[in-house]
Image: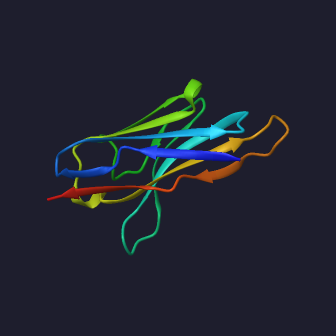
Amino acid sequence: QVQLAESGGGLVQSGGSLRLSCTASGIIFKVNVMSWYRQAPGTERELVATIPEIGTTLYADSVKGRFTLSRDNAKNTVYLQMNSLKPEDTGVYYCNALVMPTQWSRAADFWGQGTQVTVSS
């Protein structure tokens, strides 16, 4: 089984910064892709940013230039640095990982429990 541990959420004023972390642990051969999603009340979950093991990081248009996603492959950890936060960034942020538990396994999706980010105006 694979677990995703998230940390770093909280309350911040508009224009402030937060850094989210997510670490995958358990039976892991390889973590192919790691991503952050968010969900505001009454809305669908949306992709914020995604980073493959090797390759280009992609961002939602709404966060480009403000958020930076980085990855430490040795630690199976991703970091989402969020700057110039806006009230519309408020929501529950979920970590997602596409993981191969063994070299013979197909990759499967795993989710963290979510961490609340609240940006006050």
Tell me: residue 101, above or below residue 116: above
Name the colouring of the figure.
rainbow
Residue farthest to the right, as pictured: 104
Which residue is at the front of the view, 18 or 64?
18
Instruction: Identify which residue is drawn at 57% across, 32% down.
Output: 76
Report the number of discs. Answer: 0
Q: Nearer the viewer, residue 51 or 6?
A: 6
In percent of the image, x 30 and y 59: which residue is there?
90
Place of residue 11 in the rendered image (x, y in percent of width and height, measured from the top left) = 24, 53
Q: Residue furthest left?
A: 121
Q: Is residue 45 left or right of residue 97?
A: left
The picture places residue 78, in percent across and down from the top left corner, at 48, 36
Residue that appears at 33% across and 53% down: 62
Residue 103: x %, y % from top left: 81, 34
Seen in the image, is 79 located left or right of residue 3? left
Viewport quadrant of the C terminus: bottom left
Q: In the drawing, does residue 42 fall left or right of residue 86? A: right
The residue sitting at 53% across, 52% down in the picture is 112
On the image, the x and y values in percent for residue 35 come to 52, 46
Compared across the picture, whether 111 is left or right of 86 comes to right
